[in-house]
Every structure is written in C-alpha cells, then in structure tokens.
Image (tube, rainbow, N blue to C red):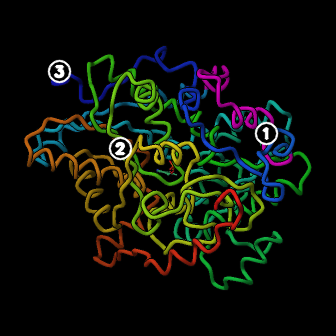
Amino acid sequence: MSNNTPYKIYLEEHEIPKTWYNLRADMKEKPAPLIHPGTLQPLQFEDMQPIFCDELIRQELDNDTRDVPIPQPIMDFYRMYRPAPLVHATFLEKALDTPAKIYYKFEGNNTSGSHKLNSAIAQAYYAKEQGLKGVTTETGAGQWGTALSMACAFFDLDLKVYMVKVSYEQKPFRREVMRTYGASVTPSPSMETEIGKKINAEHPGTTGSLGCAISEAVEAATTQEGYRYVLGSVLNQVLLHQSIIGLEAHTACQKYGIEPDIIIGCAGGGSNLGGLIAPFMGEKLRGEKDYRIIAVEPASCPSFTRGRFAYDFADTGMVCPMAKMYTLGHDFIPSANHAGGLRYHGMSTILSQLYHDGYMEARTAEQTSVFEAATLFARTEGTLPAPESSHAIRAAIDEALKCRETGEEKTILFGLTGTGYFDMVAYEKFNNGEMQDYIPTDEDLAAGFATIPDIPLNA
Ligand SMILES: *Cc1c(COP(=O)(O)O)cnc(C)c1O
C-alpha cells in the first residue's frame, strides 16, 4: 500500500492534534524527578516558581495526565505552519538503490527553520497568560532563540536571549532575525551576569556552551521582576509540546498504511526525538507494537553512548536543579563541532530512563560523515538540512544501505528537524575539505565525569 503513498503527505488542517500526548503516563518506570541541589529532595511546585511559569511547572511535574488539551491560541498559531508534511524520500531511496522505504517528518517549514517553534509558542502563551513582562533564555545554534523570538513577538512579550558565543560569531544572521522579531541578544558567557563573569575568569577565551548560557539566562530571569526563564529542550514540558510531531506522523502513517520498523532522530537534549517517537513509544510501552528506536548524537558530544546515568546539574554554573540523566558532566564543554544544537552535556530525563530500560538504542556519528549524508540528501531530496538533522539522515542512510545488503524491505522513519540555511560556515568548511572530526578521549571525558556531583543518590 505504501507504494501508492503521495511523495508528500499533508494532513488536513482539522487533523492537527488537539491534545499533546504525555508519554510519561505510559511509562512504568517514571523519569526521576528534578531534585534540589541543597536538600537533594524532589523539587516541588513552589521551588520552581521563581524560575519557571506556573502552568509549565504543572506540566513538568505531571507524570499521569495522558492527553493535554492544546489551548486555542496555540492551535491558531500552529495553523500558520502546521500540519507539517511527512515525506516519502523516493529520490534518496533511488540514489541509495535500497529496497528500504524511507520517510521523514519535516519540521523546518517555518521562518525559524526548526521544530523548536512547537514548544516556543506554547511557552510564550503560558508566560503571557500568567501576566509576565517577558522571558529569558539561552540559545545554542540559534534555532531556539529564533523560534522563541517569533513566539514572543506574537504574544507581545519581552525576550532576552543569551547566545553561545561561538554561534553568535558564526551566525550573525540568526542574531538579526531574532532582533527583527524584537529580542535582545547577548553573547555568552557575557560580562552582564555574575555567573558569566565567573565563567569568563575560569575559562578565558571560551567559546561558550549551552550549559553556561543557561546559567546566565536563569540568573537574568530570577533577578528581574516579572520575568521567567524558558528552555527549548531537555525538560518534560518541552517533550510534551513536541509530541505534536509524532502525533501528526502517526496519523499520517495510519492514513496511508505505513508501518515504520525503525524510527530515528538526532539527540541534543532529546526534544525532537522525544516528540517524534512519543505515540510510537507509547504503543511499545503498552505492548501493542514494537519499533526499533535510534537516537543519533555527535561523536564529539556522546551523552547517551559514553555518558553516565546519574544526577547532575543541568547547567555549568550550577544554578539549576539536578536531573537524573545520561550526562558527560555539567562542566563538559564539547569541541567546537558544527551541530550547535547537539552540544548539550546532558539529556532529557524521559529519554534517559527509556534508554536505561532498554526501550531505545543510541549511536554516534562523526561530523564529516554527517555532512556527507547532508550533501547527498540536499542533492536528492532538495531540502538543505540542518547539521543537527543530518545526524538522523546519516543513520537513516546507513540503515537503508544495510537493507541493500540484506535485501530487507524495512520502513524507516526519521525526523528532519530543520533547515541549514544559517549553517553555511559549516558547509563551507566541509566543501573546502577543512572539516575535522573530534572524538573526545577517555581522559577528556574523565574530566567531565569528575564534575558529576558526588551525592548518595549517585552511589
Ligand atoms: C535544537 C535542534 C536539535 C536538537 O535538539 P533536541 O532537543 O535534541 O531536539 C535538532 N535539530 C534542530 C534543527 C535543532 O534546532
């Protein structure tokens, strides 16, 4: 039947899901709660109130409600760029000469260019509903900051973005997009916050990391009246919002009789992967279906594949709570690879628990092989992919090539999380043959692991 599927499957507008799906409701082993670094007790609503918006805290703590209604103003905004298409990558299949069927869910079809807008608009909405003046955040590669600037402009909220310095310098155009939507953008680590000054003093010349920028943004939120901090990945609430990716993909698959065997996503903090797999993983957890689910991370920042499953700080400056996750240590700063959105030291607690319990696999990809995959994809399927998304493309291609050898007709579904128009410095390096692969040595990793807190819970 899938032979008769259109190249691009667009759902009807009325088929956009009206509820998000909370995967935690179907997990027997719930993700470990965030804990207070001082008391080591699970964080309660009041503990988080100074940092996060009230409704988002409720979503963060809710392990039980399976279907969460999407408020109408968010639905209205979603209609500007959703439903997102599920594409049958027939041109890529042909180039690979594979019997495998390859589908991708494309989330780059909005100005910010990535899936991050799905959660940005939700978070901005709840901040506005609470009557806040504005929000602060960090951005790595710039996609989250761009998405949030669009969302804040829509709901007329002030936005202050701390942008990882290496991206700020490499991607001046991203910065200008954010400013066009009304955000103010500061390179991190900055000299504007106490934690920024401290990090600059300890790591002179550092190009920054997501962990540093998070610390700065949290400090900026908690020291200003009427502001809260919002985060574009990792948190349970973000995976909840991103479930719209998987719900749409699942509906499209059902409509056309597509049954994926393998589902693949790149993993930075885990939000797109957690969103894409949500309804499929739900079926797997309930014992209704089985899927192979694969997370792909950069060889330079291998949280799942080489990290420890332990409580660690969510940020370099240790101002955030601790989360139990696969981590490289909160002080781990990855080498300057070109997938800025995958440079986080930790991982979603939901995905960490699922990986720990054997429900999914993980692998790494090296930078040059990722860009080879990106180039083949661009030349065959037409869309210029984001370097982050290209990790998933790499794995999808590798699985399809295995099928060529074995003759198996597997169906592969992967998440194409965004476009790469702002990543041309990276593409330039690759095209010039100047791109290098960085794989941290065990010694490099040991330095990061040494910063994982030595608390009884980690014994
Ligand atoms: C941020 C980003 C990612 C990685 O973040 P996750 O939270 O792991 O999804 C992947 N792709 C793109 C295009 C991004 O912007």
Q: Residue at x 33, y 18 (%)?
A: 254
To which residue does mark 3 refer? 4
Please name the amino acid that badge 3 sits on. Asn
Disc number lying in front (3 or 2): 2
To which residue does mark 2 refer? 264
Q: Residue 412's image quarter?
A: top left
Question: Residue 148: which numbered mark, if any?
Answer: none
Apparent side of residue 111 relative to residue 71 in the rendered image (left or right): left
Q: Position of residue 382 (x, y in %)?
A: 27, 46
In primary-sequence order, the first of circles 1 and 3 is 3
Q: Position of residue 443 (x, y in %)?
A: 48, 81
Of 235 and 376, which appears nearest the observer?
A: 235
The residues tagged by marks 3 and 2 sit, at their Cα atoms, a distance apart of 23 Å
Q: Quadrant of the N terminus?
A: top left
Q: Which residue is drawn at 49% across and 14% down?
A: 14
Q: Tag 3: Cα neighbours inside 10 Å, few (<14), some, or many (≥20)?
A: few
Q: Residue 84's image quarter?
A: top left
Disc number lying in front (2 or 1): 2
Q: Tag 1, which secondary structure?
A: loop
Q: Tag 1: Cα neighbours inside 10 Å, few (<14), some, or many (≥20)?
A: many
Q: Tag 3, which secondary structure?
A: helix
The residues tagged by marks 2 and 1 sit, at their Cα atoms, a distance apart of 32 Å
Residue range (magenta): 50-76
Apparent side of residue 252 relative to residue 327 in the rendered image (left or right): left
Q: Where is residue 417 in the image (x, y as percent from the top left)?
A: 43, 45
- On the question of residue 338 being in view, the answer is yes
Q: Residue at x 43, y 78 (%)?
A: 441
Of 370 and 446, which appears nearest the observer?
A: 446
* Residue 45 in magenta stretch: no
Please name the amino acid that badge 2 sits on. Ile
